Image: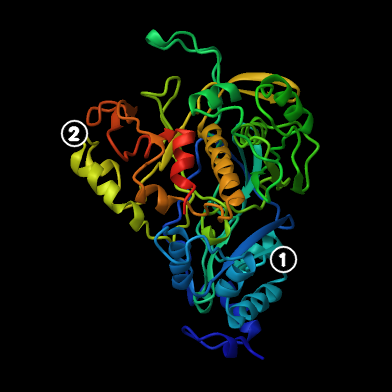
Amino acid sequence: MTIQLLLKPACCPYSLLGLLALILSGKCSYSPEPDQRRTLPPGWVSLGRADPEEELSLTFALKQQNLERLLELVQAVSDPSSPRYGKYLTLEDVAELVRPSPLTLHTVQKWLLAAGAWNCHSVTTQDFLTCWLSVRQAELLLSGAEFHHYVGGAAETHVVRSPRPYQLPQALAPHVDFVGGLHRFPPTSSLRQRPEPQVAGTIGLHLGVTPSVIRERYNLTAQDVGSGTSNNSQACAQFLEQYFHSSDLAEFMRLFGGKFVHQASVARVVGQQGRGRAGIEASLDVQYLMSAGANISTWVYSNPGTAKGTGWWGRRDYPCAHPSKYNPGRHEGQEPFLQWLLLLSNESYSLKNAFQEEAVAQFLSSSPHLPPSSYFNASGRAYPDVAALSDGYWVVSNSVPIPWVSGTSASTPVFGGLLSLINEHRILSGRPPLGFLNPRLYQQRGAGLFDVTHGCHESCLNEEVEGQGFCSGAGWDPVTGWGTPNFPALLKTLLNP
């Protein structure tokens, strides 16, 4: 069978060999990512061209089906007023809905086979296909690509990337969204360690954030822990040779967990747990997820690989199948010891965020001070949704208690752990877990949260903005979202239905 029979001809008919010739000639091609940024991020340095025989992995994102139907289901199961609220899809349900067509699967597999790809593997939904190729094969397959070695980041991470755009045969346009592993560099962690404590005006000396500080700040009692009997669990993930150590977790709980019932070990590690040094970010995630969501079974998903040949992209997650998806930011103002950061949405790019349109419009029309309109996109995804402490955390890493760790990566596991506690109450009451929380947060207009109404975040230090960005106000704002958690009130708000 020829490729001509499998694909709709774009500008010329061809067989399988003809497809390879087409790749080599560069004719009848298209750019899957015409606006993809290809500038080198700060802190990264090129080490020169990769050897043609060097091996690397690339991930091919295949076209999904039924995305509009998926969006409808996401909205329905996340809307408390919908009869489908809380009736989540399983991963198998999602796979059945979005799995690429047989034509797409067959076409892409034949194309990669003809190019010499090997050791290909897919995922349950079959919309990502990761294969190994030599650099020479990859550059022939992806017209225009030119692979180089780079090093950068705090951990001196080594990656292979292409500084040049790539193109695919036009006939693949109905079948391939993009190819991962060419342009995007590993994200930089927001975690930072301050060299010394801060003194904040009349507040006095800040001795650091520990689980006790968090539990007092957000009004948790010693009884606000998991029961240990429900079918409830929480999870976090570690990537790019970031690992937690079980001994660090045990020591952290020994030092800081004495005032509440907790678990001192994770229930399960999915994937390979590396044997290298513990990473501060991985350590913090596990320690604060398990101290905020105390006494709840916790899993850790581990990807031990380096960034070599690994693609970083943002596309299509499935809130129907996830226990919670929300977007925490960090703030100061009424919460002391915090600094500002706007956190990019972790939501699926395909979702239309109608749930937040009213709140955003109200902020834009009522705020007495806004940055120049050229500095933000008023029609884009607005963030954050919520906020939490993020500055001056104590973390145990490689058997050493480390103070003054700061970043949005700190606030995220804390808020996630509190939602796990709320899910515990819901499950014990015979209700489903919260699922995709964002629509409900906006429908309830921040009920159960402390509304932060004072303070502005720093912005570009130039004459036009003069160092000031968005400011907090009543209700939702792009500094602290709807505010910070007040656990008893948040539990009451989210327990029913």
Whole-percent x and y of residue 445?
34, 45
In the displayed structure image, the side of residue 194 where residue 334 appears, left or right = left
Give the number of marks: 2
- Where is 249 relative to 56, above or below? above
Quadrant the N terminus occupies: bottom right
Furthest-front residue in view? Answer: 429
Along the viewing direction, whichever of 328 and 489 lies nearer the viewer = 489
In the displayed structure image, the side of residue 53 where residue 377 appears, left or right = left
Under tag 1, what secondary structure?
strand
Is any part of residue 393 visible from this angle?
A: no
Residue 262: quarter of image: top right
Along the viewing direction, whichever of 171 and 404 lies nearer the viewer = 404
In the displayed structure image, the side of residue 186 where residue 373 appears, left or right = left
User: Sequence order check: which comes first, mark 2 or mark 1?
Assistant: 1
- Where is 110 relative to 154, above or below? below
- Reading the image, the residue beneath label 1 is 121
Whole-percent x and y of residue 467?
29, 26
Between label 2 and label 1, give the one nearer the viewer: 2
- Reading the image, the residue beneath label 2 is 368
Under tag 2, what secondary structure?
loop
Three-letter amino acid code at the position of disc 2: Pro
Whole-percent x and y of residue 296?
67, 41
Along the viewing direction, whichever of 328 and 224 lies nearer the viewer = 224
In the displayed structure image, the side of residue 135 where residue 338 appears, left or right = left
- Where is 65 relative to 251, above or below? below
Whole-percent x and y of residue 230?
68, 48
Three-letter amino acid code at the position of disc 1: His
Image point (40%, 36%), residue name? 449
